[in-house]
Amino acid sequence: MIRLQDLITEITLGGVQPYATQFTWDQQGRGHWEARIDADGEPMVFAFVLTDARQGGEYSFAMMSQDRSREGFTVTHARSAAAGRINYLRLISTAAEAILDFARIYAPMSIDITGSDNTDTNKDLQKTRIYKRLLDANAAALATAGYNVLMRGGKLWLVRKSTADSTGIAD
């Protein structure tokens, strides 16, 4: 069994090569962006969906794998065709790359990175803890991109730092 602390230690040490480090973001609709990658033969989708267009935009992040039915994609581990077939450490490292890439290119005001499984609250919490530790381990890269990691109300956020002075005028 992989323990969370072992997972984070390995990610922090940078010994894991992501499946991809460059992404092609395709617009799927207004405020909906997706990048697809191949992870050991399994298609994966990283998605950012605009949830609030005010003040520079608020997005939600989702990492999806192909559903076992092969008819769509899912965030649910139990329905994933990729479960047990891909290297999870490489996948989570790729998710960090995708989040940073999207933030650098589109500079949204905030991104909700709270874990979701749609079937199990414990899985939601587990995914959120993994994302939190992953973002904490990559804090220097996030700071360089102009973002802070915040936990508020049980949600995990990546929030752009303000460049405004005391008058509210941005640099």
Image (cartoon, grey):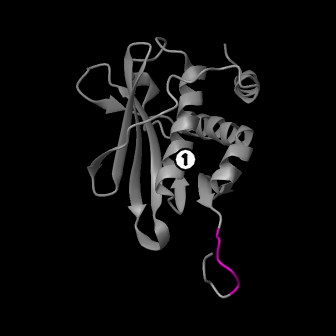
At 70% from the left and 85% from the top, the residue drawn is: 166
Tell me where residue 13 appears, x and y as whole percent.
76, 25
At 74% from the left and 45% from the top, the residue drawn is: 140
Q: Is residue 29 left or right of residue 43?
A: left
Tell me where residue 135 appears, x and y as whole percent.
67, 42
Q: Is residue 18 magenta?
A: no
Farthest residue, direction front: 171
Other residues around mark 1 within 10 Å, as few (<14) / some (14–19) / many (≥20) = many
Tell me where residue 116 appears, x and y as whole percent.
49, 40
| SS category of the residue bearing label 1 | loop
Q: Is residue 86 left or right of residue 93?
A: left
Instruction: Please determine whether, in this image, residue 88 is positioned above or below residue 58.
Output: above
Give the residues in magenta: 162-166
Q: Quadrant of the C terminus?
A: bottom right
Residue 169, picture quadrant? bottom right
Q: Quadrant of the N terminus?
A: top right
**Foreground residue among 6 and 31:** 31
- Predominant SS along the magenta part: loop
**Foreground residue among 86 and 36:** 36
At 61% from the left and 61% from the top, the residue drawn is: 160
Query: Mark 1 — residue?
Result: 113
Instruction: Please determine whether, in this image, residue 14 is positioned above or below residue 61.
Output: above
> Disc 1 marks which amino acid?
Ile
At 64% from the left and 56% from the top, the residue drawn is: 147
